[in-house]
Image (tube, rainbow, N blue to C red):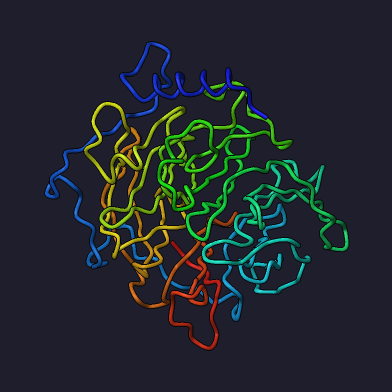
Amino acid sequence: MRSRLALTSLALTLGAATGCASDTAEPIPRTTQPTDLPSQPTPSDDPGDDPGGAPQVVDTLVDRLEVPWGVDFLPDGAAVITERMSGRVLRVTADGEQDSLGSIAGAVPEGEAGLLGVAVSPTFHDDRTLFFYVTTGSDNRVLRAQLDDDLELGDPEVVLDGIPNGFIHDGGRIAFGPDGYLYVSTGETGDPELAQDPDSLAGKILRITADGAPAPGNPDPGSPVWSLGHRNVQGLAWDDRGRLWGSEFGDSTWDELNLIEKGGNYGWPQVEGTGGGPDFIDPQLVWPVEDASPSGLAFADGRLWMAALRGRRLWRIDVSPAGRASEPKAFFTEDHGRLRTVAAAPDGLLWLTTSNRDGRGDPAPDDDRVLLIEP
């Protein structure tokens, strides 16, 4: 349990980090944009004359899944996929062969909750460990379990618990960063004030070790919090220069793409979209909520790719060497329904999951699916 001293230190540290940069600030670009709409890059739904070439659907790898949510890749190139509703964990090869690895007991699939993100240990060859983000009846938590040689999951053990849960806004994306630590996105569970509360793990991006301890170098050494002021981050991706990006659900006006800074405060609920002033970090890009409702995020082919649920499209976003996001362009609009997760495979292709059986879509008989995309 974190001490009151640690929590006070965290509040002071995060408050300092979100103001003017100090001499010790990390060299990560800080972006603010004017609040008027004409200053924002205009999202485009027209592939038109695309010098980079438009992405293409290569194949439907698997179908008839129950809301595939998390996707990460094993060293052999096969993917581990979680189903939010059923609690099943699947192994799917690049040829579409499918095996069940078992189920995660105790997951409660209500609202937006259930079995959510998955991350493969960066030392899988040695420890054969998988990590999961799960909503239980009492909290959200990170679990880990070993995969044996017969492709069966062992009993999971708790890595980090006590993350507030809710019917909505449970976050749930987990991913190991280039530094070897596990990053965990949490939602504010429909209680906006939790996002600014340093006593709460809700509405944050957390950074922990594989054992669940606060990772070395966190803003407060006694806390797992890496950034705060988030409404509901469901996408995490690092670009080719090691910068962390997060895709975030807005409320009624703007969805966001944020460049995540150590100790950064991203403004919710005081501000939605841009214009937060010096106390908060503005998003790099915003979208009307009907065009996005972003979930998964990946970096491939030198660009970011963002899956949109309500928007029912895949966004491609340019990233400059200096860390500026621009030129958002949409593909597959309305072609496949709600799009939940996009993941970059080791062979350079994208795995894109639909989310039409989540209670908010219009499922076809073969939903939900995993699509193979050539970027």
Image quadrant in which the N terminus is located: top right
Q: Position of residue 287 (x, y in %)?
A: 27, 55
Give the residue displayed 28% in from the left and 41% down from the top.
Answer: 271
Asked if residue 285 lies left or right of residue 168, the reply is left
The quarter in which the C terminus is drawn is: bottom left
Name the one closer to the observer, 250 or 110.
Answer: 110
> Residue 130's x, y, as percent?
73, 51
Q: Residue at x 57, y 63 (%)?
A: 69
Quadrant for residue 66, please give it.
bottom right
Residue occupying the point 63% across, 67% down: 83
Q: Is residue 222 above or below residue 230?
A: above
Left of 101 or right of it: where is 227?
left
Where does the image place residue 157, in percent across and percent down from the top left?
A: 79, 47
For the residue pair 283 and 220, the one nearer the viewer reads as 220
Q: Name which quarter of the figure residue 137 lies in.
A: bottom right
Q: Which residue corresponds to the image point at 48% horizontal and 67% vertical from the top-left?
A: 373
Residue with the most extreme top position: 23
